[in-house]
Image: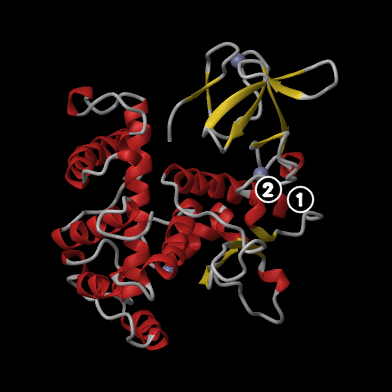
Amino acid sequence: MQIFRCTNCSRQVYFENTMCSNCGQNLGFNPLSLKMITLHRDNEGRWMDEKSGQFFHYCTNSQFEVCNWIINNNDPAQFCIACSLNQTIPDLSRNEFLIRWRTIENAKHRLIYSLLKWDLPVISKTLDSERGLSFNFKSDDDMPGSKRVLTGHSKGNITMNIAEADDVEREMARNKMDEVYRTVLGHFRHEIGHYYWEIFVKENVLLQDFRRVFGDETIDYQQSLEKYYQEGAPDDWNQNYISAYATMHPWEDWAETWSHYMHIVDTLETAQAFELIPTSKFKANSSFAYANSNFEEILESWVPLTLAMNSLNRSMGAKDLYPFVINASSRMKLKFVHDLIHGIDSPIHS
Ligand SMILES: [Zn+2]
Ligand SMILES: [Zn+2]
Ligand SMILES: [Zn+2]
């Protein structure tokens, strides 16, 4: 993530801010320019960017404090591009669900930021029922009997159990699943990987290359799932996979790899924005990590950064921020995702 500043007082502000904590001006994120805009009210009560003279309105979801994205007044849309993807939102008459939804939307907006940064297709299912994307945030309370909402992806529909936004519930799930990392943003980055697999790899010339790198995805998914939950990952999983769960099925290997590529690139962008990476390593360019088509350069910056981040966390008595090791096989898989996103030998951007 890049650094955003209030243009009124130049103080640094967070991606999620709706107001500058220093000068009190209203802020809104413009998903078209990927910039934070400081907004002033004009005499008629309209929100104006004094720099460009353009008028904006806030996404309708700003009333619930789940979104700070703005829409140009030329566009009558009520919802921003991120919120327009929502098909199901939690029951807002329950305050605890509203609080969970805020956590979920914070992570989802970060996800969409990355997709826009790469210029990947972000199309609502309401516009394209075949290839579009939708988000469904559900509670176990919506389910009959003792059924649980399963977080996952199916045909462009991403479902998340809103319990994932509750720290206690998520930590219990992490423990039960014996995972080293579990976050709402991590879930989104994983599930969107499944979505783009269907868009870019399935029924594509890339499928043969995919099988060479990730294995044959036609093996029975349900059986693989049951086997994984009964037996767990093979002991030597960390020789060939980025996580234990990636061993379950080639689709999960893909989604885990995709999410790691997103972790790496977005965190690198943040580190670069804060000048935590020696500038001699590359040209000063705030888009470095997202725009960099040189995979080796990305990885060369990443590995020392993970050591620094983990050491910082250990200094604070916290767990490692990046508790993973990138082995040779994971490197090859990450390169596959990188090449696909950068349109290298792939038809993704054509
Ligand atoms: Zn300010
Ligand atoms: Zn919105
Ligand atoms: Zn998955």
Q: Residue 95, which numbered label?
A: 1
223 in relation to 158, above or below: below
Q: Residue at x 53, y 54 (%)?
A: 122
Seen from the viewer's position, the closer of residues 265 and 133 is 133
Residue 321 visible to an observer of this rendering: no
Residue drawn at point x = 31 percent, y = 47 percent: 322
Report which quarter residue 8 is drawn in.
Answer: top right
Q: Residue at x 31, y 50 (%)?
A: 342
Which percent across, then down, holds residue 330? 21, 60
Marks 1 and 2: in contact by CB < 8 Å?
Answer: yes
Query: Which quarter holds ligand 2?
Result: top right
- Residue 339's spot in the image, x, y percent? 27, 55
From mark 2 to mark 1, how far is it between C-alphas? 6 Å
* Residue 194 in view of the camera: yes
Answer few, some or many: residues within 10 Å of disc 1's Cα (few below 14, many 20 plus, some between 14 and 19): few
Q: Is 37 on the left or on the right of 76, as rendered?
A: left
**Which type of secondary structure does the marked residue at label 1 adopt?**
helix
Q: Amino acid at mark 2?
A: Ile
Farthest top residue in view:
9
Q: Is residue 45 left or right of residue 154?
A: right
| Residue found at x 51% / y 59% | 170
| SS class, disc 2 | helix
Where in the figure is residue 326, as x and y percent of width and height? 20, 54
For label 2, the residue is 99
Query: Mark 1: is the Cβ under 8 angstroms from ligand 2?
Result: no
**Relative to 126, is 275 on the left or the right?**
left
Q: Nearer the viewer, residue 300 or 319?
A: 300
